[in-house]
Amino acid sequence: MRILLVGCCGRMGREVTEVAAARGHEIVCGVDVAPTKMPYPVYRSFAEIGENCDVVIDFSSAQGLAESLAYAEAHGLPILLAATGYRDDDFGQIARAAKRVPIFQTGNLSLGVNLLQSLVKRAATVLGAEFDVEIVERHHNQKKDAPSGTALMLAQSVEAGRGALARVYGRQGNTGARPKGEIGIHAVRGGNIVGEHEVMFAGEDEIVTLSHSARSRKVFASGALRAAAWLLGKTAGRYSMDDLLCDLI
Ligand SMILES: NC(=O)c1ccc[n+]([C@@H]2O[C@H](COP(=O)([O-])OP(=O)(O)OC[C@H]3O[C@@H](n4cnc5c(N)ncnc54)[C@H](O)[C@@H]3O)[C@@H](O)[C@H]2O)c1
């Protein structure tokens, strides 16, 4: 694959650069608002790009979305949106662009987390309304958005199994007794934690906890390259890890 890597100088950009080289993919160039030396040309803006590529991988930030989508659309390229922190209007933009180019978007590219999602949905269905659900996520102290995209995906999985719940982001003060029909989501930040997610189902006499721990960023870089390769040749539309996993099974 010939790859254009957006956000190439960040933690994930450097990880993808390493894994891509080991797998024989070529990063033809990168775009980053804070360029540093990489083994390929790095541009501050898309306007400077002269190279051709097969696919765009975006590990920058939600703020980079509009420019990445505009470039992919202008060049008819498939694009993997791997950044997190997108808001509702961003998802509107993604849906519009997906009418013209294939777009893969996921808040978590690890196989384990995607398995966790389906286990969480099943647990929510089986355990039902008698169990209080709380999600705790832990990440490094440089992470810019909270809660993590993965925590939100896990909340959706709970709701897919149990119906809509009122989301409560952290608690403080005189909150009173915990109402039924609530889901608590908590973000912990510190050190160099790669990414940990825990979903707790607390009942009267038993607790079920499902969790995932990422031990290195390589898991996301490998997942990104696998998703990008899978996206090549797809028709315009929106794709997620579910689509990729369906093809794997
Ligand atoms: N989907 C997943 O599985 C997954 C896994 C890990 C991280 N992420 C997400 O990927 C993103 C990057 O993570 P990171 O740890 O590498 O962050 P980082 O801050 O280390 O790197 C981001 C890089 O993007 C650049 N950048 C920021 N905004 C930009 C813009 N508008 N245009 C061009 N470049 C821009 C920054 O200069 C930086 O070099 C975050 O949103 C993070 O949450 C997703």
Image (spheres, helix red, strand yellow):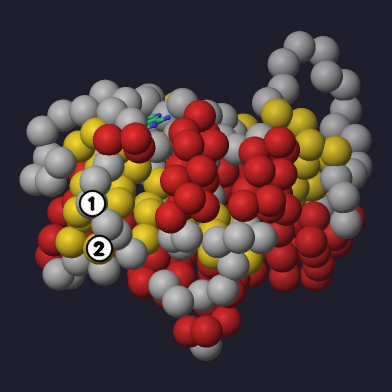
Instruction: Please tell me which residue lies in front, 219 or 103.
Output: 103
Quarter of image, res 87: top right
Left or right: 124 with respect to 246? right
User: Quarter-wise, where is residue 59 in the image?
Assistant: top left
Provide residue 2's location: percent of width, then percent of height: 25, 63
Amino acid type of the residue that numbered disc 1 sits on in the rendered structure: Glu
Going 15% across and 41% down the picture, which residue do you hit? 41
Q: How many marks?
A: 2
Residue at x 85% of width, y 59% of height: 162
Residue with the mark numbered 2: 2
Q: Quadrant of the image for the N terminus?
A: bottom left
The image shows residue 125, relative to residue 133, as above or below, that is: below
| Residue 127 visible in the picture | no
Dividing the picture into quadrants, the one containing residue 42 is top left
Q: Are marks 1 and 2 in contact (CB under 8 Å)?
A: yes
Quadrant location, ligand no. 1? top left
In this view of the protein, which residue sits in the foreground, 62 or 170? 62
Q: Residue at x 71, y 36 (%)?
A: 89
Are there few (<14), some (14-19), or many (20+) residues within 10 Å of tag 2?
A: some
Element assignment for label 2: strand
